[in-house]
Image: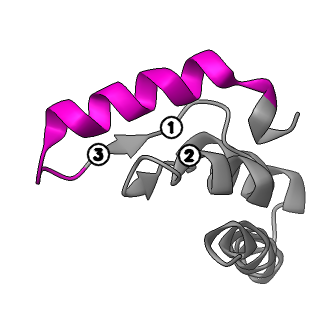
Amino acid sequence: MRADQFPLTQEFLARMRALAGDLPLAVGFGIDSAEKVRAAVRHADLAIVGSALVDAIHRAGTFPRDAVEAAAFFVRDLEKGLHP
């Protein structure tokens, strides 16, 4: 789904950003793509991707090297959401 398909979420995050003032604001629920990271950090300081990262590692298999490579690939892909 695209970020513009979540207008109520964006409105809510804008209100929370105003209420939070200088406090850091983090958001995370179903964030598993660069596009969703981009949408999350529109009004928040952090995008929480814990469950999605665990899923990526789990899908990689049982070898530690595969898990590390899968995690690195996933994080690099998500990072694209931080750059215009």
Q: Nearer the viewer, residue 19 or 81?
A: 19
Nearer-N-terminus badge (2/3): 3
On residue 28, the disc is 1
Look at label 1 and name its amino acid: Gly
Residue 83, image x, y percentages: 66, 78
Q: Give the labeled residue for mark 2.
A: 40
Which region of the structure is painted magenta? 5-24
Is 13 included in the stretch rendered in magenta?
A: yes
On residue 25, the disc is 3
Q: Quadrant of the C terminus?
A: bottom right
Q: Main secondary structure of the magenta part?
A: helix
Nearer-N-terminus badge (2/1): 1
Q: Quadrant of the N terminus?
A: top right
Q: Are marks 2 and 1 in contact (CB under 8 Å)?
A: yes
Residue 8, image x, y percentages: 59, 16
Q: Which residue appears at 36% of the width and 45% of the height?
A: 26
Q: Which residue appears at 17% of the width and 31% of the height?
A: 19
In this view of the protein, can residue 61 be seen by the observer? no
The alpha-carbon separation of the residues under discs 2 and 1 comes to 8 Å
Mark 3 or 1: in front is: 3
Q: Are marks 2 and 3 in contact (CB under 8 Å)?
A: no
In this view of the protein, can residue 45 be seen by the observer? yes
Q: Secondary structure at mark 2?
A: helix
Look at label 3 and name its amino acid: Leu
Residue 68, image x, y percentages: 70, 78
Q: Nearer the viewer, residue 62 or 8?
A: 8
- Tell me if 37 is positioned left or right of 26 in this view: right
Q: Which residue appears at 56% of the width and 46% of the height?
A: 40
Look at label 2 and name its amino acid: Ala
The alpha-carbon separation of the residues under discs 2 and 3 comes to 10 Å
The alpha-carbon separation of the residues under discs 3 and 1 comes to 10 Å
Q: Secondary structure at mark 3?
A: loop
